[in-house]
Image (cartoon, rainbow, N blue to C red):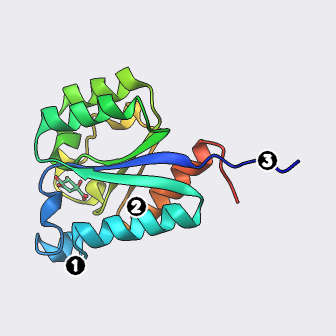
Amino acid sequence: MSQKIIPKKLLLLHGPNLNLLGTREPEVYGRMTLEEVNQAAVDYAHRHHAELRAEQSNHEGALIDIIHVARNWADGIVLNAGAYTHTSVALRDAISAVKLPVVEIHLSNIHAREEFRHKSLIAPVCVGQICGFGWRGYLLAIEALLGHLGVSD
Ligand code: DQA
């Protein structure tokens, strides 16, 4: 009897200012638009038998609401929290509260930039962190999350 593979459901969540990707400091964040990054992530997830839904907000509370809702449908989250990475206890608490595995991702290498970016308040409640690899980091993060969820091919 053949076993049906149930695809994992992933949330890709982008925080503040990431809607401006493509035009925002391209020397730091690259030239891909958010739409292009999301499309690459959706395609990559499909190739790995996963479904991915992408959302973005510039508002801390809205990001928290999206994480709360994800509790009801997602198996895990890839999160670029933008500047809230360095400031938001509320976002960190939301991650702890929903108990979904979260992979933290940044386009830039936050450890090689200004000192205030070196500290991530969310890192201790995430499975791990990927940073410094530009848009490809999102694909690495999806792979890492699927591996964490026990999916390998
Ligand atoms: C970022 C790094 C953050 O420090 C910054 O505030 C961002 C983008 C990144 O993807 O490199 O908005 O998360």
Image depth: mark 3 or mark 2 in front: 3
Q: Residue at x 69, y 49 (%)?
A: 5
Q: Secondary structure at mark 1?
A: loop
| Of pointers 3 and 2, the one earlier in the residue sequence | 3
The 10 Å Cα crowd at callout 3, few under 14, some 14 to 19, many 20 or more, is: few
The residue under label 2 is which amino acid type? Tyr
- Asked if disc 2 is less than 8 Å from ligand 1, the answer is no
Secondary structure of the residue carrying numbered label 3: loop
Q: Is residue 84 left or right of residue 5?
A: left
How far across and down, in percent of the image, does residue 18 sit?
Answer: 17, 59
Quadrant in which the C terminus appears: bottom right
Three-letter amino acid code at the position of disc 3: Gln
- Could you say which is closer to the camera, residue 131 or residue 33? 33
Quarter of the image holding residue 94?
top left
CA distance for labels 3 and 2: 29 Å
Marks 1 and 3, how far apart at CA: 42 Å
Residue 6 spot, x, y in % from top left: 63, 46
Whether 11 is drawn above or below 26: the answer is above
Q: Is residue 136 visible?
A: no
Disc 1 target residue: 31
Residue drawn at 14 percent across, 50 percent down: 16
Q: Give percent across and percent down for residue 76.
A: 46, 40
- Would you name the residue on which mark 3 appears? 3
Q: Quadrant of residue 39?
A: bottom left
Q: Is mark 3 within 8 Å of ligand 1?
A: no
Residue that carries the numbered disc 2 in the rendered image: 138
